[in-house]
Amino acid sequence: MGVLLAEARNKLRFAEGKFIKNEVDLQVLHLLGPKTDADLTAKTVKQRKTDSPAVISTVEPRVEEEEEDSGASSMEELFRNKVHLHKPGENHKTDGYLITPKTMAHLKNHLKITGGKVRTRFPPEPNGILHIGHAKAINVNFGYARAFDGLCFLRYDDTNPEKEEERFFSGIQEMVHWLGYEPSRITHASDYFKDLYSLAVKLIQRGLAYVCHQTAEEMKGIDPPPSPYRTRSVQENLRLFEDMRKGKYSEGEATLRMRVTLEEGKQDPVAYRIRYVPHIRTKDTWCIYPTYDFTHCLCDSLEHITHSLCTKEFQSRRSSYYWLCNAVDVYCPVQWEYSRLNLNYTVVSKRSFLRKPSTGFVPSWV
């Protein structure tokens, strides 16, 4: 372990040592599993007699001793001793967190609701079978909550009725149980469809969202021109959004977009789109469905999640996450990112898996 740590520090000379060590601990834990009793037992190594000159190691002995003494034997121990995130209610002390005049009032109410306990969530989309890449997300979210005697929700991100099947819902829950975890609560994004719709109306009323008739192709590109529908009045946008809900437009004919330019340059992400497909739970109640960018942070807020833990690929969406919660004036959780699991000689992308059954490369998921 000392050799690995020294090599990592040598290659990442400008990174802070404790972060390198935390990541090495986490990756080794995922690769080899928790330490066994045999691993924790002190080993005695016989010194071999030799006439050869002594070989001087370039690795300082204290690094190996430090690593051996401080290795985590479980995910819970790793999170308690190695990972230093904010305490519940101290969201405003984290880097990049947006603070408004109402922030402290929201945090006070948040602590009253949660009792100061850690709350995390594992939010998979039920459009396929989980793979080994999801095992890390499950362990991180459930493991962090368990380490601090907190709660972890299993929340199905069921906002795309075209791809969701009952077998995927049950398969996800079975996988969580198989890894040794029990959700504190099982929820669905669809549980909050009415709340999300009300918040979308609130966003329009504040002049921060508009109905757009551009096609997906017209919205593509690195720096597309502003939508010609961006300056519509609040009253017109409210009427058009209600028309979307009533099914007066075809799929792709209208979307609701958030009026914001994010740090990474992305302009006006889509909040709602039209889908005339029966939902597995709500049936034909809705024909408009919220996107990930709109749903994710607001569901976290509604469930009073303390730590929104996700992989690095979502780091660019953190600005959107914070902006939207504050734009509709609700409690804003803190998003923390960790590295995704990458393996050689295998596929750990669900998008890649999704293409295989549909193209006939494999007969089905199971």
Image (tube, rainbow, N blue to C red):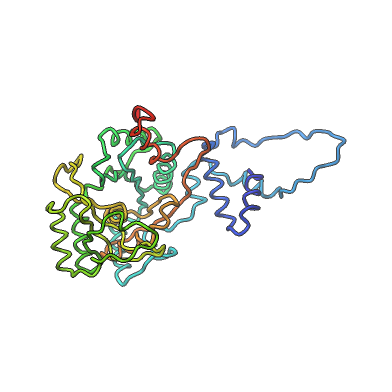
Q: In this view, does 41 lie to the left or right of 56?
A: left
Q: Count the labels in the image.
A: 0
Q: Where is residue 270 in the image (x, y as percent from the top left)?
A: 28, 57
Front in this rendered view, residue 225 or 201: 225
Q: Position of residue 108 (x, y in %)?
A: 31, 64
Vertical comparison of 228 with 311: above or below = below
Task: Tell me where residue 84 appears, x and y as whole percent.
Answer: 48, 55
> Is residue 248 shown above or below 208?
above
Q: Which residue is drawn at 66% across and 53% down?
A: 10
Name the residue nearer the viewer: 229 or 290: 229
Looking at the image, which residue sits at the far bottom? Answer: 101
**Nearest the eye: 57 or 104:** 57
In which quadrant will I find the N terminus?
top right
The quadrant of the picture occupied by the C terminus is top left
Q: Quadrant of residue 202?
A: bottom left
Question: Where in the figure is residue 229, as x and y percent of width and height?
Answer: 23, 65
Q: Residue furthest front?
A: 218
Q: In the visual, does 304 lie left or right of 287? A: right
What residue appears at the point 57 percent right and 44 percent down from the top-left corner? 71
> Is residue 24 left or right of 98 when viewed as pictured?
right
Residue in the foreground of this view, choosing between 285 and 56: 285
Query: In which image quadrant can residue 233 be found?
Result: bottom left
Residue furthest right in the image: 51
Q: Which residue is drawn at 36% across and 55% down?
A: 306
